[in-house]
Amino acid sequence: GAVVSQHPSRVICKSGTSVKIECRSLDFQATTMFWYRQFPKKSLMLMATSNEGSKATYEQGVEKDKFLINHASLTLSTLTVTSAHPEDSSFYICSARRGGRGETQYFGPGTRLLVL
Amino acid sequence: DQQVKQNSPSLSVQEGRISILNCDYTNSMFDYFLWYKKYPAEGPTFLISISSIKDKNEDGRFTVFLNKSAKHLSLHIVPSQPGDSAVYFCAALNTGTASKLTFGTGTRLQVTL
């Protein structure tokens, strides 16, 4: 199956700093990548959808200036949490879709962010 | 507005028996459904999917059933194994639009010896 990696797997940072999370599709070209956030005992919440070479589409309620998404190539998307605060602590998961709209999304292993 | 619902937050099944996980949806525009398995602190792993033109899809021990009129789908795992213990999410999408996955809240399956 398709492999999606995320780096780092875990990060602890001080409040006010920025954190970058990378998402890579290792064995396929991802036309679209998605970023999710999972709160404890909650469903996965879609934050934004990014297509290679274009601006990300953010879901309602997600601050685009807070969560910067860059999809520079067909195998790499990055999420930068700017000026992180303790309430940004969460589990962030990316997914990548290989082909057209009906294709399955393949998920990365997730990144645990803890903001102190 | 929770468009995809998994009303059972947890389920316990004995090893070797059948596990049945249920999922209901409200958006009639959804035409593709997926089941994901998730371990703690890991990303979801794709299990099986079904298009709305079918009512059943089988892959090894996993079978997904879709009842469009009832807007209901279920995942059957038989026989259940201890390694199946995880959280299972159903997800739905409308392939004709932006194709965003809408996830249910998950069901924690515990397979006991």
Image (cartoon, coloured by chain):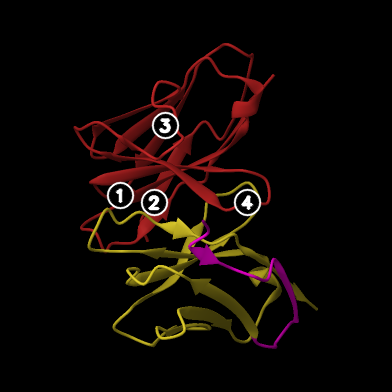
Chain colours: A red, B yellow
* Residue B22 visible in image: yes
Magenta span: predominant SS is loop
Residue A59 location (% of width, % of height): 39, 40
Q: Which residue is mark 4?
A: A42
Which one is closest to the eye, mark 4 or mark 1?
4
Query: Helix, strand or loop at disc 3?
Result: strand
Which one is closest to the eye, mark 2 or mark 4?
4
Q: Which residue is mark 3?
A: A22
Residue B47 location (% of width, % of height): 47, 69
* Nearest to the observer: residue A65 or residue B65: A65
Res A27 label? 1
Q: CA distance from mark 1 to mark 2?
A: 6 Å
Determine if the magenta segment contains residue A32. no
Q: CA distance from mark 2 to mark 3?
A: 14 Å
Disc 1 chain ID: A
Q: Residue at x 29, y 83 (%)?
A: B53
The type of residue carrying mark 1 is: Asp
Disc 3 chain ID: A
Q: Does label 4 or label 1 sit earlier along the sequence? A: 1
Q: Residue at x 31, y 64 (%)?
A: B94
* Residue B59 visible in image: no
Q: Does label 2 or label 4 sit earlier along the sequence? A: 2
Disc 2 chain ID: A
State which region is magenta: B1-18
The type of residue carrying mark 2 is: Val
Q: CA distance from mark 1 to mark 3?
A: 16 Å
Q: Is residue A86 above or below residue A51?
A: above
Q: CA distance from mark 2 to mark 4?
A: 25 Å
Q: Does label 4 or label 3 sit earlier along the sequence? A: 3
The type of residue carrying mark 3 is: Glu
Q: CA distance from mark 4 to mark 1?
A: 30 Å
The reply to whether dot 1 and dot 2 touch (C-beta < 8 Å) is: yes
